Amino acid sequence: MKLKYLLMLKQGLHQKLQQKLSPQQIQLMKLLQVPTIALEQRIKQEIEENMALVEGGDEEAPQDESSIDDQIGEQDETDNSTEDEFDLNDYIDPDDAPDYKYEANNRSKDDEEKNIPFVSGVSFHDLLRTQLSFQNLSDKQKSIAEFIIGNIDDSGYLRRESIAIVDDLAFTQNISTNKEEVEAIIKIIQNFDPPGIAARDLRECLLLQLERKEKTEDILLAVVILKRFFDAFTKKHYSKIIQRLNITEEQLKNAIDEIIKLNPKPGNTLSESAKVNQHIVPDFIILHEDGKLILQLNGRNAPELHISRTYKNMLQAYSDQKGKNNKQMKDAMTFVKQKIDSAKWFIDAIKQRQNTLLSTMKTIMEYQYEYFQTGDETKLRPMILKDIAEKVHLDISTISRVVNSKYVQTPFGTFKLKSFFSEGMVTQSGEEVSTREIKKILLNIIEKENKRKPYTDEKLAIFLKDNGYNIARRTIAKYREQLNIPVARLRKEL
């Protein structure tokens, strides 16, 4: 048994090839994914964690040396490896001190810096609560009403069953009520402005709005259509409605016109100024100057970064006292060295990030030169990540990180970088075109169609084939869905 066990043990010499990313490379990969709008926060975080990294001009306020000493003491408890030798000139040589500025100083002090004003306002639910305060209700009823208002979504809908509200009031508010009382209070809230508020579904929302209008013939017919033929109306089965109600097409058209005027999301009409403003900060800017394309990396408000002079002076002071050769001095020098190294790596990573972003965007701009000159989507060439990666000699994953969540500002608008990447297909003439060009042509055909008889997917496929694009009906349906265009029956108008 022992002999068998010994035979199982075997020594051998093997070669193994492995590729591992250094901490600096990992840091660069993470920074590449960060868009410009989040880069400032990332830099602030790094400055808070590393006192050797500072922003602003060359002169900075003296740092609190007691806090530095505290950090050295903390590090001494966890890191006892202080025997590594290093050249002090690598850290205090002023000619080799890395710094980084995000932009060239090529603007005048008179340049106007435009800011986007953000307006604050009363929230949607506060407006409803204000109207509630004018109602003559008991304390219990007001508590129930406030709970119901809190369950109304931003579109103005109450998406919860009355019995569920009754249960929640009992468990969370210790309020005993019933379904009938909750329904009565919902009716009160539905009389608030704007009309249609607190509806449970679209049908109820539209009916609530029609109830407040003058009872004309068209309004009364619209109410009947919504109450009795809502499903047929949403599916545009107009012939069925005409036949069942024994009305003319003109009468139906007038009633539908009244329904179309209604707001399907009444909550959106309240407090637009209080809604969240989403402002896109472009990572790149492409300008036209004398017929040429000029590329800029957006970094106007980014700070300058350099190594703290305080840390350099501390390292010089520790070096002058190295003859004392005690453990505390070695720990202090090692701590300062590590902080300076970390600051250097971060500054270098920011530099590499800038160079990688610029080289990648420059290649995209050259690849899609005709589009950026004209803004015509039909000029977009088929382009995938591999095409750009081969030109800039970077890995596809790196290009993906650069493209992810990045925007470019052009004279024709601000776009996501991802929108310029698309597959291609070959036309009957042998020309390679982008799928975006095909979608643009498809959109133009649908916009010009007769809305009384919209084109089916089969008809659209025939039109494109006549123009040299041999595309199957299934592909047409896929492109139409990507463009958020409904089927022919739902595009029909009277």
Image: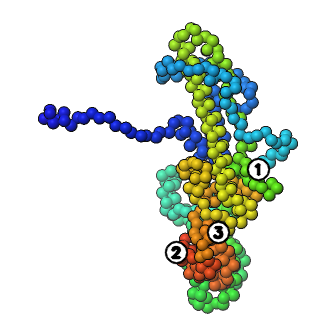
Q: Name the residue under label 3.
A: 437
Mark number, residue 474: 2
- Camera-nearest residue between 358 and 114: 358
The answer to whether 115 is drawn above or below residue 188 in the figure is: above
Which quadrant is home to the N terminus? top left
Labelled disc at residue 116: 1
Q: Where residue 441 appears, x then y in whole percent? A: 65, 73
Q: How far apart are marks 1 and 3 (CA)?
A: 34 Å
Of badges 2 and 1, the one in the foreground is: 2
The reply to whether discs 2 and 3 touch (Cβ–Cβ < 8 Å) is no
Where's residue 110, x and y in %? 86, 42
Kind of residue sitting beneath label 1? Ile
Tell me the element at label 1. Answer: loop
The crowd level at tag 1 (other Cα within 10 Å; few <14, some 14-19, many 20+) is few
The span from disc 2 to disc 1 (Cα, nearest Å) is 44 Å
Disc 2 crowd rating (10 Å Cα; few below 14, some 14-19, many 20+) is: few
Q: Which of 31 and 73 is in front in this view?
A: 31
Dot 3 alpha-carbon crowd within 10 angstroms: few under 14, some 14 to 19, many 20 or more:
some
